[in-house]
Amino acid sequence: MKATYKDTLHACYLGYITQAIVNNLAPLLFVIFHDNFSISFEKIGRLILINFTTQIITDILAIKYVDRVGYKSAAVLAHFFAFFGLVGLGVLPLLLPNAYTGLAIAVIIYATGGGLIEVVISPIVESLPGDAKASAMSLLHSFYCWGQLAVVFITTLIIKIFGNHVWNILPILWAIIPAYNLFKFMRVPLMPIISEEERIPIKGLLSSHLFIIALVLMMSAGASELTMSQWSSLFAEKGLKVSKLAGDLLGPALFAFFQASGRTIYGICGHKIDLRKALMASSILCILCYGVTIFVQLPIMALLGCALCGLSVSLMWPGTLSLSAERFPNGGTVMFGMLAVFGDIGASLGPWTAGLVSDLAQKSHRLLAFGQAANLDSEQLGLKVGLLTGMIFPLMMFIGIFFMKREKTP
């Protein structure tokens, strides 16, 4: 049977599930890496930095070469890298003399695939026939969240049943999805993307104050989301002293559920909602959620703050993409690529900064004394102070949306 544009859309959904695997599997194994290989929190945070730095470099290269290579070839190549990187995550740390080197190599390989997915999937969906583009974009990104939820739930369940020693099998099992979607993308049809003559050049985009604000919004969105989602599992187990099962299910799993629900609801009802007002409300809620997670001592309330943070960030990334596509309809690969670059800058700097600040806080005698007075051990204090840096980014998001509302459309 001949493939249709509905098959194309389904392949794009699986592409974002692949992206969810790439970004969220390793963080669930952070405690295992920390305990088995004696890797510090800063080095664990550096794995996140390596992931998103690689995606940034891939995004930049994709801006130049994707139109030449073609979107179908780029999508197939993206899933090829994701597959081999995930297999490497399960194999290389055990084969190489230095486990951290093996982890880093695997992260670089699958992050290359993740970067390509990020650049090519959104414009493919944007080009497909249909109205309500903002809703379609939000629904697409909801599959990232449902994928994240599946990764958290299934991975946590397998580790609970079979034990930590099976961790290296998990990336190989998850690699089946990009392997399948690789072949799916080979056969689906694509709509023509914007021609080079119609496309706005980089200089044209960068000369617009609105686009500069959009780049800041993407950076803030990436940092707001990933700082909480990447550290929530470790924070729950080490910072709140709950079991790994409870921490993963009540922290990152509920985070992903609320994030997926928010994007799905907007995908269905988004045409009735003012996107800018929704983004401002999301920013305020995100600040409050970070505050509850950090400052409330009751573990169940802190985990609830972490979970609701997923709802607060649900619209930030796809909403910024939709605002940009609305203002710059001929932005094409260049626009989506640059937005992806700045989103990944935020997604890498946010979690890495949290890890760095966490390590520094544990070396501060003044902060340690404050922690003792608050009945916090060094790890609890460090993780709370690290997450505190994440509150900066939703504040930047709020300010950016405020100024974008005041700017006139060019």
Image (cartoon, rainbow, N blue to C red):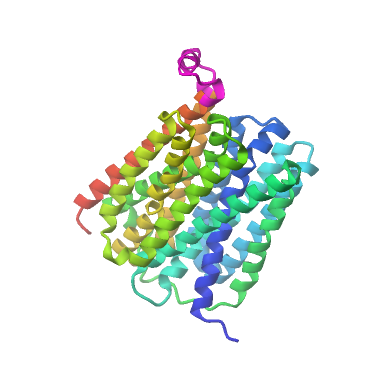
Foreground of the two, 177 or 356:
177
Determine whether 369 is above or below 165 in the image. above
Residue at the image position 45 percent from the left and 28 percent from the top: 297
Foreground of the two, 73 or 204:
73
Foreground of the two, 77 or 378:
378
For the image, the number of numbered tags is 0
Residue at the image position 41 percent from the left and 52 percent from the top: 314
What x and y, as percent, mark residue 194? 40, 71
Determine whether 245 is above or below 371 in the image. below
Q: Is residue 56 left or right of residue 262?
A: right
Q: Is residue 392 magenta?
A: no
Q: Is residue 152 left or right of residue 406?
A: right
What x and y, as percent, mark residue 354? 49, 33
Magenta-colored span? 360-380
Is residue 70 shown to the viewer in this render? no
Residue 172 sits in quarter: bottom right
Residue 319 sits in quarter: bottom left
Determine whether 248 is above or below 193 in the image. above
Q: Is residue 372 magenta?
A: yes
Foreground of the two, 409 or 246:
246
Is residue 210 shown to the viewer in this render? yes
**Outermost residue to the bottom:** 1
* Magenta stretch secondary structure, dominant: helix
Residue at the image position 75 percent from the left and 36 percent from the top: 98
Query: From the image, which quarter does the N terminus lie in?
Result: bottom right
Residue at the image position 48 percent from the left and 59 percent from the top: 63
Query: From the image, which quarter does the C terminus lie in?
Result: bottom left
What x and y, as percent, mark residue 261? 43, 57
